[in-house]
Every structure is written in C-alpha cells, then in structure tokens.
C-alpha cells in the first residue's frame, strides 16, 4: 500500500498527520507533492522518511491511491493533467465537497472516491464523509472504509446532504471555535477574568464536553436538561441566547450553501469549457 497526496495545504497536512500518527501508513509509503514544493519539503522535515516528488507525474508512478487536496478552482485542471497517467487500478480520492463523484468520473478513467476530512482527524477522531463512484469495486470500497477507521469514523452519505454534512463535521470546529472566542472576549470585557483564565476555562470545558458525548453519558438534549435547573442561572442564559439568536444558523447555512453553489457552477463551467 503506497499512498500519494497532491496538495499540502491545511487539509492535506491534516491527512498526512492522520495517516502517519495513526500508523495506518509508514512514512516510506507516503508520497507528497505541492505546487509550492517548499511546503512539501517543510513537512518532510517533520517526517523525514516520506517521499517528496517534484511533480504529479513522478508521484503517480509510485502509488496506488491518490488524494487530491487542491483548491476547488484548481481541481479540473489537475484532473485533466492526471487523466493520461491514471490507470484502472488506481484509486483517486478527492477531498472537495463541491466536486461530485459524477464530475470526477466524467474526466478520469480509474476508481474514484470522495472523502471530506475534518480538522478533528488530526487528533485521530471525528468523522470523515465518504462517497464512492460507480467504478470502484466492492473489495476496494470496504478496504478503504476499513483504513479510514484508523483515524476517524467514516460515514458514507448521499450527495444531496454533502454540503450540510460538511458544514457540521468539517467547518463545524471552526464555527464553534469562533463562537467560543466571542464568548471569551465578552467575558473579558464585562468581568474581571483574565484572557488566560477565560481561555483555559473554555478549552477545559470543551474537552470535558466532548468526553461526555464520546462516552455516551448524555445526548445533547439530556445535557441541557441536566445543567439547566429550572429558574437557575443556566436557564436565564439559554433564554437570552434564544432571544438573540436572530437566525444565526439559518443565515450561516444559507451562506455556505450559496458558496457551495458558486463552486459547483465554477467547476461545471471548467468541465464544459
């Protein structure tokens, strides 16, 4: 098993860490490349036995599975470059939600999958969203899902919920970190708590919160009920949040779906060019 990774940006680096720290792959079985090759060599400084290739053609010749981790705007150009050198036995995995399996299969002639990762995979936790093409055989599919279990919980999902599922599992950590940062800042502004104290308390709360869910102590609704004593401080706080939400998450979902639509239209235009 030799895997290659094209693109070493944020998510590409998350996957490299997940593959190696979970011991799914040995360093010598991982090949990486990047348009700015210095970024790939910087990762090699941390993992000295991985292979850095100067271009995608050198990489493809060495691997059986290729992860395509480039920006949506660059996807079609890279796929067109890959098309002549991909063979039937290759598995090509895209991590871009806006590029459907059908889009990929319309360009390349190999086995195809899509896996949308999350920053939580860096800690060998969280979910990866997976969809498979028509060309992938059942053995390869089951083997890929088994390998994803090393660093995540893979969930096979339908195309029609890809965007909202990605919002929750992939964008979600950033969204809730943003809310936490705002909570911390207001706590600093309105009380005598220091930035260091507020940040530490918030981080420890998140760790404990995650552990409660991970160990199945409570569902989200049960957790609210357990903390929210009738007439107590938590109840007053939740009432305030309900009053001031003002369509926050409705607007968030509408905006992410709008961007998703724009990306899909851009990709379609490139395919049909």
Image: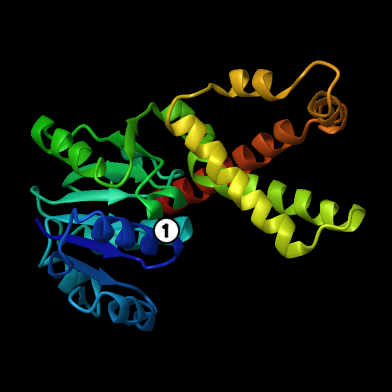
Q: Which residue is at a point 83% across and 52% down the rendered structure image? A: 187
Examine the rendering and report whether any part of residue 246 can be seen.
Answer: no
**Label 1 neighbourhood size at 10 Å, few (<14), some (14-19), many (20+)?**
many
Is disc 1 placed on a helix, strand or loop? helix
Q: Which residue is at a point 59% across and 44% down the rendered structure image? A: 206
Quarter of the N terminus within the rendering: bottom left
Spot occupied by residue 91 in the image (x, y as percentages of width and height): 17, 48
Quarter of the C terminus within the rendering: bottom left
Spot occupied by residue 268 in the image (x, y as percentages of width and height): 45, 46
Quadrant of the rendered structure where residue 231 is?
top right
Asked whether 253 or 88 is in front, the reply is 253
In this view, 80 is above or below 215: below
Spot occupied by residue 201 in the image (x, y as percentages of width and height): 67, 51
Q: Is residue 60 found left or right of 119 in the rendered image?
A: left
Q: Which residue is at a point 46% across and 55% down the rendered structure image? A: 72
Q: Which residue is at a point 62% across and 42% down the rendered structure image? A: 256
* Residue at numbered disc 1: 11
Examine the rendering and report whether any part of residue 64 can be seen.
Answer: yes
Quadrant of the rendered structure where residue 126 is?
top left
In this view, 234 is above or below 39: above
Spot occupied by residue 45 in the image (x, y as percentages of width and height): 30, 82
């Amino acid at each position: 098993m030799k895997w290659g990774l094209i693109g070493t940006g944020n998510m590409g680096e998350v996957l490299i860490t997940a593959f190696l720290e979970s011991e799914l792959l040995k360093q010598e079985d991982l090949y990486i490349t990047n348009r700015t090759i210095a970024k790939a060599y910087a990762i090699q400084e941390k993992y000295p036995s991985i292979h850095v290739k100067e271009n995608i053609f050198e990489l493809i010749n060495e691997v059986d599975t290729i992860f395509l981790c480039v920006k949506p705007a660059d996807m079609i150009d890279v796929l067109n470059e890959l098309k002549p050198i991909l063979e039937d036995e290759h598995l090509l995995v895209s991590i871009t939600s806006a590029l459907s399996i059908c889009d990929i299969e319309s360009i390349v002639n190999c086995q195809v999958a899509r896996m949308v990762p999350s920053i939580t995979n860096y800690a060998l936790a969280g979910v990866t969203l997976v969809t498979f093409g028509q060309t992938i055989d059942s053995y390869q599919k089951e083997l890929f899902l088994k390998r994803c279990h090393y660093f995540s919980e893979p969930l096979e999902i339908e195309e029609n919920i890809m965007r909202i599922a990605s919002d929750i599992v992939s964008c979600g950590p950033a969204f809730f970190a943003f809310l936490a940062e705002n909570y911390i800042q207001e706590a600093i502004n309105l009380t005598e708590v220091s930035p260091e104290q507020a940040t530490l308390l918030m981080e420890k709360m998140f760790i404990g919160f995650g552990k409660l869910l991970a160990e199945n102590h409570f569902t989200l609704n049960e957790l609210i009920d357990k903390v929210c004593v009738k007439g107590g401080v938590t109840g007053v706080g939740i009432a305030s949040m309900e009053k001031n939400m003002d369509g926050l998450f409705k607007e968030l979902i509408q905006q992410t779906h709008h961007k998703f639509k724009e990306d899909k239209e851009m990709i379609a235009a490139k395919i049909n060019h």
